[in-house]
Each structure stands twice: as structure tokens, then as C-alpha cells.
Amino acid sequence: MRQAPGGSSDQFGLGDNGLVSAQSASPTSAETGRAVSGSQALFARALAVTPGGVNSPVRAFRAVGGTPRFMASGHGAYLTDVDGNEYVDLVGSWGPMILGHAHPAIVDAVQRAVGSGTSFGTPSEPEVLLGEEIVARTPVDSVRLVSSGTEATMSAIRLARGFTGRDLIVKFAGCYHGHADALLAAAGSGVATLGIPGTPGVPAAATASTLVLTYNDVEQVRRTFARYCDRIACLITEAAPGNMGVVPPRPGFNAALAQICRDHGALFVSDEVMTGFRVSRAGQWGLDGAIEGWVPDLMTFGKVMGGGFPAAAFGGRADVMARLAPAGPVYQAGTLSGNPIATTAGLTTLRLATPDVYAKLDLTADAVQRLVGKALEDAGVPHVIQGSGNLFSVFFVETDEPIDGRDRGIHDFDDAGRQALHRHRAFFHAMLGAGVYLPPSAFEAWFVSAAHDDDALGRIAAALPAAAAAAAAARPDGTIS
Ligand code: PMP
């Protein structure tokens, strides 16, 4: 038996303390056989100045092992690392790069904006234009711009509490809404990837008012609201969860949540940081609410609307938003909120995200899913591929049997947790070695862009058979059969 990627940490040049030792630096990666010394050297230096060597946990490759690749540039559908390796990018900066990297029109707009000054601390025109674009595409009456998705959800929760005068909030296990204290209960994304049950540093009091329910279980939501009745300020949900892998809402689930909230005087907060302006021009709401005829009370946005810069937003019903300072008493602020460069990048991105772009994203996502599904099937690897619109993910579930006893599919965080993570690890490294950059976690969505063309799809197709074979051969103990 050979040792496979994901085996002992020594294999990846990580000492017991997680530091890359000078001796372990090698010109090629043990997992992929590709040049990696540049990334290794930068990682070693990063470890000396930054906890874990990264500025956001999932980037560290802890779930898959190996050296995180330090990227030097991105163009269209491709990333190039500091060792000169080129990758088809299926992460897209975790969502923002809907048009691909370094889109000429965005680069041009940003360069011109930078030349006029980078931050004024006053209102400026691009933030008005971006606000108008968001209001035109979604059901919100007005928006407040912030700098990250975390700020957006944190502020939306404060506003919901301030508006209703109630304290309790409801969220779903496996949904990630950023890293504000109250929302770090049973969270997805990096919290799930690293298997962190909760996190030190969050006072019990901060999550004591957070009720965590099972995604897609509408009866549990009904029971909870019946029990806590007039104490719940809001329910927050990812519009289509993408942080436990992509787990679409069952038909009518979001509509039911909106109704239950309305019946109990609570606000329905739809977190579209990931899905907003990605799965359709009006996000996930464009795929369900717009058709079914309901609207969230508050929505949160990020990623695509920042065009690769730090910009996010929350918005909603006029009477709720009117409670926000300076119009109302609920305080919220930001030195760089509505930053002219970030809003210019976001506005340019949204203006370029036309119906043609969304049609292409859907086709590309379908094509990738078909290619992956066929390769895994041919290699006999148990899996489920599911998504919402062009957002999808691949679950390496260990059984062909119905996952939840009702139908084959991943419907909640428990289902997602049944994945054979060793298969994901082996698959990830084989794809990386063949020049395809996938999310380094089994609990994250895959992202395509409008720049993914036949060439990019061809490279993905060429990489898949060997990666599927690696997934098939992987064993839980890190060996391969
Ligand atoms: N909400 C959702 C649905 C997200 O996916 C994320 C980030 N992945 C956030 C909130 C937090 O956004 P940020 O990382 O910009 O703080």
C-alpha cells in the first residue's frame, strides 16, 4: 500500500506544530508532483507572521493536507501560482469572480477610479449607482453598504432586534453567515471544514439567544415559533445554503419560512451573500420568491456585488430600514463603507452580468456537473451532485442508499456530514496536480464564471478520470488500495 494524500501530516512537510520545516521544502509537491517550492517558501514565511499562515482558515488546506498554493495572478478562468503552475479556477475567490479574473472592463473602471482618489469618507456617486442597481434587481426598498458579508449579517440581525424589540434569533445548522458571535453556532464553511464544534471566544451569552434548527425541516420551524412565539426577532437562512456544500431548499421551504415569520411578527432575513447576483440576476430570490410571490423582510449581499473588492450590503423593507441610523436609532457605521473603488468594481460587474452571462453560467455549471458525475460513476465512486442554479457541489457520500431514508440527496447538515472525506482529499489533490483548482474542503460550493470556455472545460474533462480513480482507491486511513 502506498500513502495517499491526506495521510500523516509529516508527508506534507508539516511538523507537529504545523510549521513547514526548512528541510521539508522540496521543489515538487508530494501529492501532485508539481513545482511547489515557491508556495512552500511563502507559506513558511506566512506561518511566522500569521496564525496558520493564512488570513482565512479554509485557505490553509488543513482539510486536504499539503501546501496551500500562493497565487500570483488570475486571468479569465485561470489562476497562476508563484511556481508558474496554471489552474482552471473553480473557486472564483469563493464567489465574487462571476466574470472571471481581471476582466478588462473592470480593471479599466477600477484604474480610472483609483486615479480619482481611493477613499473620501464622504458620500460619492458610485455608491448611489450601486445602491440603485441592487434595488432594481432585488425586492429590497433600500440598502446600506458595508465591507464584508459578516458585517452585513451582523448588522441585519441588530436591525431586526432593534425593529422588533425582541432578542431571539433562529438559524439553521450548517448555514454560515460570517463570523459574528451570535451566528457562530453550528456554522458551516470553515467551521465545518475544520470540525470546530463552536469556537472559544464567543461568550455563552452571545449564542444563548440563537436557536439552531435543522435545515429543510419546516415542521421543526413551526414548532419552534409556536413555542417561543413573540420572543423571536428574526429567522436568518442562507437563501440556498452553500456552506455545507450546496443544499438547496426543498420546494416551498423559503416561502414557508417567510410565512411563519410573518405569522409571528418576526423578520425573515435571507442571506444572499453567496447566491446574490450569482444564481440569477436577482439571486436565489429570483429563482423562488419572485415566482412564488413572497419577499424577505431583510436581505444580505456580498461577493459578486463587490466585483472582487470588499463590498457587501444589507437591505429590505422601507419601514425596517428606516430604523437604521441616521434615519433611526439602530446604530451601524463603517469608515470604508461604500468605498469608491469597491463600489465601482461592484457596479461594473453587475452591469456586465447580463441575462446572457447568467445563461452561460448555467450551461457551464451543467457541463461541469455532467463531466464530474460521469467520471465518478465510471470509477464507481459513490457521490451526490446537487445545486441551486449555477451553484453546485459534489458530495462524496459513502452509500448508494437513500441518505435520509426518503430520497437520495443531501438535505441538511447531518446528511452533509456523512461524506467520505478521504475521497474528497484524494480527488482534490489529483485535480490540483492536473491543473484544476477546486475548493480545498468538502463543505464548500464550486463556482464557475462566464470566462470558463471550452478550453477550460476540456482541461477539467482531461483531469477527471485519474482524479475519480484516485477517489475510488482512497481509504479512510489515508492509504490507497
Ligand atoms: N453569508 C454567507 C452566505 C457567506 O457565504 C459568507 C462567506 N462565505 C458570509 C455570509 C460572510 O461573508 P464575508 O466572508 O465577506 O464576511
Image (cartoon, rainbow, N blue to C red):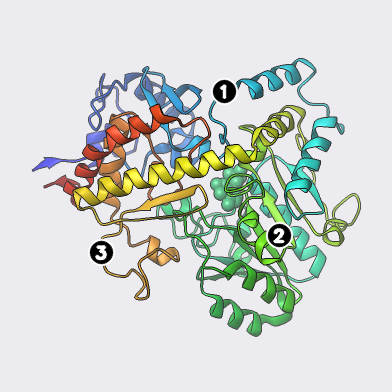
* Residue 444 in picture, x, y percent from top left: 44, 48
The answer to which of marks 2 and 3 sits earlier in the sequence is 2
Mark number for residue 465?
none
Q: Are marks 2 and 1 in contact (CB under 8 Å)?
A: no
In front: label 2 or label 1: 1
User: Disc 3 on helix, strand or loop?
Assistant: loop
Say whether residue 276 is visible.
yes
Q: Give the labeled residue for mark 3.
A: 399
The answer to which of marks 2 and 1 sits earlier in the sequence is 1
Q: State how far apart marks 3 and 1 are (Cα).
A: 41 Å
- Residue that appears at 51% across and 30% down: 451
Horizontally, residue 263 falls left or right of residue 254, namely right
The image quadrant of residue 410 is bottom left
- Counting other residues with Cα less than 10 Å from the Cα at mark 1, is it few (<14), some (14-19), or many (20 or more)? some
Question: Identity of the amino acid at label 2?
Answer: Ile
Question: Identity of the amino acid at label 3?
Answer: Thr
Say whether residue 179 is visible.
no
* Residue 65 in picture, x, y percent from top left: 31, 39
- Residue that appears at 53% across and 59% down: 175
User: Disc 1 on helix, strand or loop?
Assistant: loop
Nearer to us in this view, 26 or 462? 462
Q: Is residue 48 above or below residue 190?
A: above
Q: Give the labeled residue for mark 1.
A: 102
Q: Is residue 370 above or below residue 130?
A: below
Please identify the quadrant where the N terminus is shown.
Answer: top left
Nearer to us in this view, 330 or 327? 327
Q: Give the labeled residue for mark 2.
A: 157
- Residue that appears at 37% across and 61% down: 417
Q: State how far apart marks 2 and 1 are (Cα).
A: 34 Å
Q: Are marks 2 and 3 in contact (CB under 8 Å)?
A: no
